[in-house]
Amino acid sequence: MRGDFKSRRTPLRPPWALAEESFLAACTRCGQCLPVCPTRIIAMVRGYPEVDFSRGECTFCGACATACKDGALPRADDHALPWTIKAQITDNCLAHRGVECRICGDPCPVTAIRFSPRLGGPPVAEVDAATCTGCGACVAPCPVNAINIT
C-alpha cells in the first residue's frame, strides 16, 4: 500500500475560501493568491493553496481574495468573516511541563491569549475563543509547536 495516509485532515485554505468541496471545484490552481500575500503564508500543497502559519500570520488584508478570479475566495465585503478557525494550545505547552513561557501572547494582535496563574507552577496560556481571529500570529513563535489552528 502506498499513499499519504497521515494527512487526512482538511487543509487550511486561504481566508474567505469556499467550503472544501466547493473550493476544490472552483479553484483552477492558478496560484495568483500566492505572490500577493504580504506575509507569504500561502503555499501550494498538492496543487492547491494552503495557509502555513509556520511562515507567519494572516493580516486579513484581502489581497488573496482580490487576486482570485475563480470565485474560490469570495470576499463578499469588508465585514465578511474570513474563517471560523481558532488557536488551540495543546498539552505540549511548556507551562504544562513546569517551564515559564509567554512567547505566544506577545504577537497576538487582539490579546486573545491570556495567562492564568496557578499554584505550584508557571501561568498557563489560555485562548479566549471569542476574541481569537485565527490569524496564526502565535504559531511560529512557539518553541515547542504547541499551538494548533483549527
Image: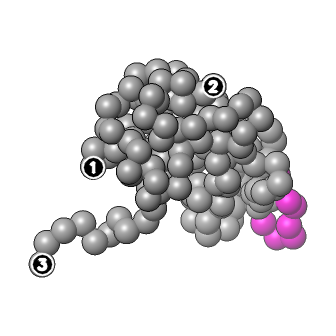
What label sits on residue 1 in the rendered view?
A: 3
> Relative to the observer, which residue lies in front, 22 or 110?
22
- How far apart are the alpha carbons under marks 1 and 2? 25 Å
> Relative to the observer, which residue lies in front, 130 or 79?
79
Q: Is residue 126 left or right of residue 56?
A: right
**Residue 140 in view in this figure:** no
- Residue 6: x and y in percent read 32, 69
Q: Which residue is mark 1?
A: 46
| 37 versus 134 height, above or below | above
- Residue 7: x and y in percent read 35, 65
Secondary-structure class at tag 1: loop
Secondary-structure class at tag 3: loop
- Give the magenta part as a residue range: 114-121
> Relative to the observer, which residue lies in front, 129 or 67?
67
Q: Which residue is mark 2?
A: 61
> Which quadrant of the view contains residue 66?
top right
Kindly identify the amino acid type of the residue bearing the numbered disc 3: Met
Q: Are marks 1 and 2 in contact (CB under 8 Å)?
A: no
| Residue found 51% across the figure and 29% down from its top | 64
